Amino acid sequence: MNPQSTYKTYLGIFFQTLGAMLAFVVSLILGNMISPLSSAIREAGKSASGFLPTGLAFLFNAFTNAVILVWAARRSSYRGLVLTGQLFIFSFGAQVFMTQIETGYFISAFPLLANNFQLYNLVLRGLLTSFFFSLLVTLLCGGFSRRPRSQTAFTVDNDRAVKHGAWLPMVYLALYMLFGYFVAWQVQELRLFYGGPADLNGFFEQWSASLMGKPELPAFQYFRGVLWMLCLVPLFKGFSGKRIELVLLSGLALALLPTAQLAFANPLMPAAVSLGHFWEVSISTGIFGALCGWFVPQAVEGSR
């Protein structure tokens, strides 16, 4: 590739990323217009604070989503609505569905979501935002043009996926327990928010107490590990880059898509709790995403 061609490529990526950042904000606005939050949540939001100022939180979320989805779109061998669907499942799954099923599991910690349909509303808002954003990114990255796409380098073989999908969720469970205690549970505000002790318990003492109260928790988190892996399948299928690039993108996606939104002022939890969860989840699921990117996708014969 000559220097002029390289310059044009990087310039194209730059403008696509800027366009995608704007598209993300537009998608958020559309999702909010179609499916607004309840008056109780909006009222609580007036006094809420995030771990970043509002402007920086918007910039951080827009940049994170733009980089990840533009990267995925440019490396996909698919086009048109198939590419849109690929980006949508990837984005909605990792950013909305996976976060809200855990919110539902710990619903007792969120009074504003209890005994109403607001959790479903949050899912609907996220679904709409992800759809509009995926559609706009497809358009920005030339997914609806007739230009030839790159050749597929990876696919997902059923036997390989089942084989690695049996033990990888066990790794996720271990990461969840380790980072849940050694990162999130170190924050006193977070412990008190979930009804834990003011003074820090030992690792085994705390997890023994947690499992006594929720004996099904390991099975639930193992199942979430399976779902995290499935969220990445649309990224794996049709990816045209190298293995190391896929590993990096998978790790970055699971690290930041579920957590970037925690930077916003959150009426459901204090800023200290959001920040504790940000570091806990971004590190643990980022590691898990990278492992999935290494073990699950299979290189297409002759592509490497």
Image: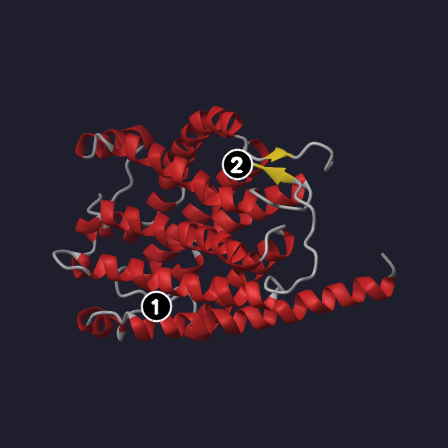
Marker disc for residue 292: 2
Specify the quadrant of the image occupied by residue 105. top left
Relative to 135, is 154 on the left or the right? right
Looking at the image, is 78 positioned above or below residue 266?
above
Say whether residue 45 is visible.
yes
- Picture coordinates of residue 3 (x, y %)? 86, 63
Specify the quadrant of the image occupied by residue 43. bottom left
Where is mark 1, residue-wise? 265
Q: Residue at x 69, y 46 (%)?
A: 151
Classify mark 1: residues with Cα within 10 Å, few (<14), some (14-19) or many (20+): many
Classify mark 2: residues with Cα within 10 Å, few (<14), some (14-19) or many (20+): many
Between 43 and 197, the residue placed more toward the observer is 43
Tell me the SS state at disc 2.
Answer: helix
Task: Give the mark nearer the N terminus: 1 vs 2.
Answer: 1
Looking at the rendered structure, the kind of residue marked 1 is Ala
- Picture coordinates of residue 162 (x, y %)? 46, 27
For the C terminus, which image quadrant? top right
Between 169 and 262, the residue placed more toward the observer is 169
Judge depth for marks 1 and 2 and give the one in front.
2
Total marks placed: 2
Relative to 262, is 135 on the left or the right? right
Q: In the displayed image of the protein, which residue is found farthest to the right? A: 2
